[in-house]
Amino acid sequence: MAEEDRQTVKDDDLYEKLREDQGYSKEKAARIANSAAKEGRSAQGKKGGNQPQYEDWTVEELKDRAKELDITGYSDMNKDDLIDALRSH
């Protein structure tokens, strides 16, 4: 991790695990790591939203979400590509 990133991430170990093992984007991994440092890691597992996993969404639903997030090129993506794009956004 770059020196400037280390200043904003409060739990480096969790950040690295989320980036390398889970494939999370830098922003998402940093949000989770910082929240876990503040509230405790066990609290993070309890938070979660009520949305189903992207794998359970239809391609049309995934495209609608990609459009909401201003992801470019979504109209030509297949389901796996859409899921990857949404998760790395």
Image (tube, rainbow, N blue to C red):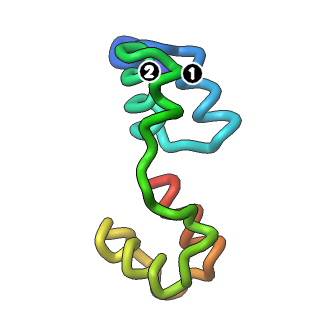
- Badge 2 crowding class, 10 Å Cα cut-off, few under 14, some 14 to 19, many 20 or more, is some
Q: Residue at x 51, y 19 (%)?
A: 41
Query: Which amino acid, by three-letter code, is at mark 2?
Result: Ala
Quadrant showing the C terminus: bottom left
- Depth check, front residue: 67 or 5: 67
Q: Quadrant of residue 57?
A: bottom right
Residue 34 x, y percent position in the rendering: 38, 21
Residue 14 x, y percent position in the rendering: 57, 21
Residue under numbered circle 2: 36
Instruction: Please say if the residues under marks 2 and 1 sit with CB atoms less than 8 Å apart.
Output: yes
Query: Which amino acid, by three-letter code, is at mark 1?
Result: Leu
78 versus 17 height, above or below: below
Residue under numbered circle 1: 14
88 versus 6 height, above or below: below
Q: Residue at x 48, y 76 (%)?
A: 62
Q: Nearer the viewer, mark 2 or mark 1?
A: 2
- Depth check, front residue: 69 or 55: 55
